[in-house]
Amino acid sequence: MLVTGVGQATAADAAGAVGGRDRIKVAIQADSDGATCQVLIGGSIVTTINVPPNQQWFQVYSAEPGTQQVAVTCGGVFIFNTQVNVDKPNAFLDAIDNSLEGIGSSQLSTDRTRR
């Protein structure tokens, strides 16, 4: 599930996050002005990123299984703030996903953060 939020008077159009196995994928879409944003997981800043104008940026972070709070601020304004579920690791499914990526079929991945 990809959840998006739009802020007012910010330089980013949208941001979203999705949980996977031991991972969280965060995406930010900048508008024509670009965006300087911070990503927070569990209330802690994990990165500050400058997203070029009209570009999308994404990053995958390691995360503990369970419910995790994910937020994005751009220009000091929260544009995204939600909880995502992070699944436990699964070596068997990771092996399948590695094989799918190897043949160029990552869109079929069983882990949403690998799509």
Image (tube, rainbow, N blue to C red):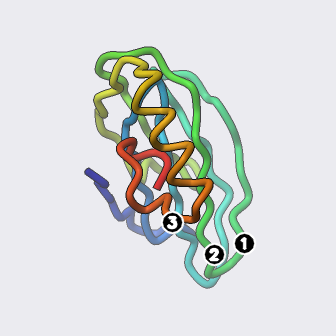
**Quick check: marks 3 and 1 in contact, CB under 8 Å?**
no
Q: Position of residue 73 (x, y in %)?
A: 52, 47
Find numbered disc 3 in the image and state the secondary structure of the residue it sits on: loop
> Considering only order in the chain, which callout, 3 or 2, is on the residue closer to the N terminus?
3
The Cα–Cα distance between marks 2 and 3, rounded to whole angstroms, is 15 Å
Label 1 crowd bin: few (<14), some (14–19), many (20+), radius 10 Å: some
Give the amino acid at mark 3: Thr
In this rendering, the answer to whether 97 lies above or below 41 is below
**Quick check: marks 2 and 3 in contact, CB under 8 Å?**
no
Residue depth check, mark 3 versus mark 1: number of the one nearer the observer = 1
Give the number of the disc on residue 10.
3
Q: Position of residue 64 (x, y in %)?
A: 45, 15
**Residue drawn where x is 49% and y is 31% of the image:** 23
**Residue tagged by mark 1?**
52
**Residue drawn where x is 56% and y is 43% of the image:** 98
Closest to the observer, 109 or 96 = 96
**Residue drawn where x is 62% and y is 51% of the image:** 37
The Cα–Cα distance between marks 1 and 2, rounded to whole angstroms, is 6 Å
In this rendering, the answer to whether 87 lies above or below 80 is above
Residue depth check, mark 2 versus mark 3: number of the one nearer the observer = 2
